[in-house]
Amino acid sequence: MRLSRYFLPILKENPKEAEIVSHRYMLRAGMIRQQQAGIYSWLPLGLKVLRKIEQIVREEQNRAGAVELLMPTMQPADLWKESGRYDDYGKEMLRIVDRHERDMLFGPTNEEMITDIFRSSVKSYRDLPLNLYHIQWKFRDEIRPRFGVMRGREFLMKDAYSFDMDEESAREAYHRMFVAYLRTFKRLGLTAIPMKADTGPIGGDLSHEFIILADTGESEVFCHKDYLSKEIPGDGVDFDGDLSGIVADWTSEYAATEEMHDEAAFNAVSEADRIAARGIEVGHIFYFGTKYSDAMNAKVTGADGKDVPVHMGSYGVGVSRLLGGIIEACHDENGIVWPKSVAPFDIGLINMKAGNEDTNSACEQIYERLGNAGFDVLYDDRSGQAGAKFATMDLIGLPWQVIVGPRGLKSGEVEIKERATGKREMVSLDAVVERMI
Ligand code: ATP
Ligand code: MG
Ligand code: MG
Ligand code: MG
């Protein structure tokens, strides 16, 4: 992509409304634009990252055996009246009336709708286990939308729903999502810690929030230091096998959100290993048994011919919130430092003297070769000060910069800079592609 033909509305000044670094950088890097409180347009650079995050989430859901579908954003109130949540949900739900005076709502979550889909077609134990998910926009009329995409009103969520015959197999479904989440956040460059979360009236131990530590997080959390360096299950993990060992290992040390915090148990951890910090909830998995299947009559016939209400769990990931979360974890004073897996482009190519015959032709050559080698390159081919170009590239945080100036070219060389470390090296024009692979 040539920057001269792209749409990257960089802000020079720090926007006043942005209180935290991720919000500030997302606005300054031209990734999002606020349209109303908590409602954003995704500009080209932001959209690219959003799609990459979405794709990693999708790949790990598929790997764990979940099946993608897509439900609408608009839902009929009737389903929520069946479950009893239409009245309970309160003001966070955006309620809408259509021209026929029918009550509708912009979905804040999809338990009711997925239960409706399930009950209309699944009748037998032979069709289970089943896990259905979608990645769809949600709306919650948050009382205090803030921190940019971190707490939006309209936001993108992955939500999966598992269906099982009994609690035991529901637990296995829960384990699959637990492990899928560990892998997902790791691939996104994050250290997310599964912490015991509130189970409400359902009880039991099957609710975890996945939390990344950050001073700007809205939750207060407590955990053992070991979680920061624990090994994540690799590509070879068998989702058809028994995952209880992995989950047991990942829940063996203390980790709890504020609601579940047990001061005495936490104090039993040696002081040097205790972490009391703030965190960002990036995912939440939850087993809720037959709460919705009872209320909405979603039954399956077992091997013994008896009908039982299906056991369910739900599994959310805050896809759009993750952009903010990743930036909170990966930045420096000059801008964003994207993990490679989600960077909007692989390489930024800087022509220090656009218009100069030598730098132009060297840049064209590098641009073409890198493209042919499969790299997604953002080429700053605009006229303008080199200093401003450097600042823009640092701000948008691509993993590598290739800097082409007349002086280096005299000896046939260009400069390569690694964004994360700031390390620079000179390489010959012909060696650029090789160096990047
Ligand atoms: P929070 O405690 O932050 O309000 P929640 O517990 O209400 O979140 P869930 O219902 O568990 O959220 O939804 C699943 C995931 O969706 C959350 O873990 C979070 O990552 C994301 N999410 C929830 N609310 C928002 C929001 N207003 N903006 C962006 N992402 C959100
Ligand atoms: Mg909430
Ligand atoms: Mg929460
Ligand atoms: Mg939650």
Image: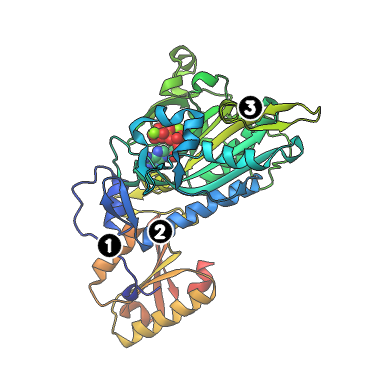
Give percent across and percent down for residue 365: 44, 82
Number of callouts? 3
Check the image and report above or below for 304 versus 424: above
- Is residue 132 visible to us here? yes
Q: Residue under circle 1?
A: 391
Front position in the image: 407 or 282: 282
Determine which of the numbered discs, if any, sits on residue 31 in the image. none
Q: Earlier in the sequence, mark 2 or mark 1?
A: 2
Farthest residue to the top: give it: 264
Mark 1 or 3, nearer chain start: 3
Looking at marks 2 and 3 on the same chain, the residue that comes earlier in the sequence is marked by 2
Q: Tell me: 319 left or right of 93.
A: right
> At which x and y percent is residue 401?
39, 66
The quarter of the image holding the N terminus is: bottom left
Residue 252 placement: quadrant: top right
At which x and y percent is residue 431? 50, 75
- Judge whether 350 appears above or below 235 on screen: below
